[in-house]
Structure formats: structure tokens, C-alpha cells
Amino acid sequence: MAARYNYDRFDEYVESGEDQIEFSAFPNHLHAGDPAPDAALTRLDDGAEVRLSELWLTRNLVIEFGSYT
């Protein structure tokens, strides 16, 4: 059996299906687990533009949109 998430309320929320009901109100937005769209990004060190798809070819990426808490 998989370990439960750290917060009991979150497990109950997901198990109840409430998350899917709330997410369905935003059909054109990304949600956790969705693949990121390809985009042009600016590198901070030299200002060069790179595509997300180019970075995926050479390394693993973690992209965080919003709060990481």
C-alpha cells in the first residue's frame, strides 16, 4: 500500500474527488502532473534564448509554477 500524503486533509480531499471538480473550473490551465508546454526561455547567466524542448534533450528538469511550500 502506498504511503499516505503528509496531510490527512489532503488525502481526504483527493479521495473525495473534490480536487477534480475544482480543477475542472480551469480547463485551460496546467495542473500537477501535466506536461509543460514548449516555450522560449531566457537564460539568466548570458541572456540567450533557449527552448524548453532543447533543455529536455540534455537534462532532467523540474519546473515549478507557483508556490513551493
Image (tube, rainbow, N blue to C red):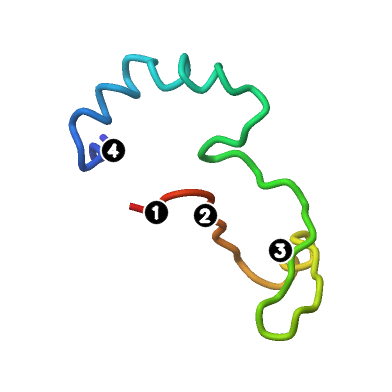
Q: Amino acid at mark 4?
A: Ala
Which mark, by number, is residue 64? Answer: 2
- Name the quadrant of the N terminus: top left
Residue 26 coordinates in the image, percent (x, y): 59, 23
Q: Earlier in the sequence, mark 3 or mark 2?
A: 3
Q: Which mark is residue 55?
A: none
- Reading the image, the residue beneath label 3 is 56
Q: Residues within 10 Å of mark 2 (few under 14, many from 20)?
A: few
Q: Is residue 26 above or below residue 67?
A: above
| Alpha carbon distance from label 3 to label 4 | 29 Å
Give how far apart the Cα atoms at labels 1 and 2 are.
7 Å
Q: CA distance from mark 3 to mark 2?
A: 15 Å
- The percent coordinates of residue 36 (x first, y second) are 67, 47
Q: Amino acid at mark 1?
A: Tyr
Quadrant of res 34: top right
Report the label total. 4
- Whichever of callouts 2 and 4 sits on the residue coming sooner in the sequence is 4
Q: Earlier in the sequence, mark 4 or mark 1?
A: 4
Q: Secondary structure at mark 4?
A: loop
Q: Which label's residue is closer to the chain start, 3 or 1?
A: 3
Residue 39: image quadrant is bottom right
Q: Amino acid at mark 3?
A: Trp
Q: Residue furthest bottom?
A: 46
Tell me, for residue 68, which label it has, or none. 1
- Within the image, what quadrant is residue 2 found in? top left
- Kindly report the distance in space between the C-alpha atoms of the residues bearing marks 3 and 1: 22 Å
Residue name at image x 41 percent, y 22 percent = 19
Q: Secondary structure at mark 1?
A: loop
Q: Horizontal placement of 68 versus 39: left or right?
A: left
Q: Name the residue beneath numbered marker 4.
A: 2
* C-beta proximity under 8 Å, tags 1 and 2: yes
